[in-house]
């Protein structure tokens, strides 16, 4: 019985980790369809390419994928009228923002009420590319503390997902979750509530060829670049 439940949980989590998602998006967001370009979306949403690139941390506005969710309206409380005007007129003034050099959010905001911190100390040995790497890899010594990047509920703790080793998944709200893989030891259990900065695991090398933490951020079931939401070191 327990084995059957475990298999069902793992299957559901695999779907969460792998799905691009087709559910309706909220106000101010748009899901990319086949044939879309950022320029086309900007025209339809009456904004600028520079704004969409800045709101979504796009270093290359041409590199969008079918199913990707983009913010197409300014975050609540932000001042964008001057930026939009400058971008529409083709200005290259710094106040307009340039998509070639986006800066990480000042507060490292991943979403309403969600702010992330680095989940472990160490060297980033691999970044996010959206295909071969769905997150970032942080290398350090075995046993290095792994902490919760934000407060939330542990929805998975185990080693049933091939290629991830001892893994934790924390749900932060209806849209965001984070995943922590290859741990030597897991210090929290499924169903447990954790606080930001609380140690949740010890870095290890389970299902990996070296000691490291593989860290992922998922938005509405889709992998996103953690560097967009983590503060500068």
Image (spheres, rainbow, N blue to C red):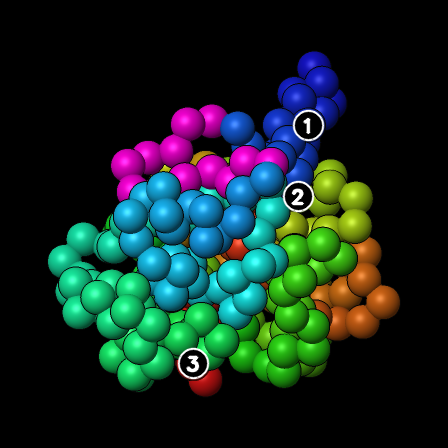
Q: Residue at x 33, y 35 (%)?
A: 26
Q: Quadrant of residue 149?
A: bottom left
What residue is drawn where x is 36% and y is 42%?
Answer: 44
The magenta-colored residue range is: 23-34
Task: Classify 10 Å Cα crowding around label 1: few (below 14), some (14-19), many (20 and above).
Answer: some
Q: Where is residue 50 shown, x and y percent of the image? A: 38, 65
Asked whether the beta carbons under mark 2 and mark 1 sit within 8 Å of each other, the answer is no
| First along the sequence among labels 3 and 1 | 1
Which image quarter: residue 162?
A: top right
Residue 189 placement (x, y as % from top left): 52, 44
Q: CA distance from mark 2 to mark 1?
A: 13 Å
The 10 Å Cα crowd at callout 3, few under 14, some 14 to 19, many 20 or more, is few
Label 1 secondary element: helix
Give whichever of 201, 169 is nearer the camera.
169
Q: Is residue 173 magenta?
A: no
Q: Which residue is mark 3?
A: 232
Residue bearing the label numbered 2: 158
* Figure check: 156 above or below 194: above
Percent x, y of residue 85? 21, 66
């Amino acid at each position: 019985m327990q084995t059957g439940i475990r298999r069902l949980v793992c299957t559901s989590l695999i779907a969460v980790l792998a799905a691009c998602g087709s559910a309706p998006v909220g106000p101010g967001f748009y899901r990319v369809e086949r044939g879309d370009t950022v320029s086309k979306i900007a025209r339809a949403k009456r904004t600028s390419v520079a704004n969409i690139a800045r709101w979504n941390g796009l270093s290359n506005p041409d590199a969008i994928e079918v199913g990707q969710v983009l913010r197409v309206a300014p975050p609540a409380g932000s001042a964008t009228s001057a930026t939009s005007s400058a971008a529409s007129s083709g200005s290259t003034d710094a106040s307009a923002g340039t998509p070639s050099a986006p800066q990480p959010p000042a507060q490292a905001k991943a979403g309403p009420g969600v702010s992330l911190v680095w989940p472990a100390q160490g060297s980033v040995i691999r970044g996010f590319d959206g295909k071969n790497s769905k997150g970032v890899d942080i290398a350090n010594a075995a046993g290095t503390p792994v902490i919760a990047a934000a407060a939330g509920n542990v929805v998975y703790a185990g080693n049933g997902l091939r290629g991830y080793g001892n893994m934790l998944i924390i749900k932060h709200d209806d849209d965001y979750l984070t995943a922590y893989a290859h741990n030597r030891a897991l210090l929290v259990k499924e169903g447990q509530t954790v606080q930001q900065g609380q140690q949740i695991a010890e870095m290890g090398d389970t299902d990996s060829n070296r000691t490291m933490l593989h860290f992922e951020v998922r938005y509405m079931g889709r992998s996103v670049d953690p560097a967009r939401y983590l503060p500068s070191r």
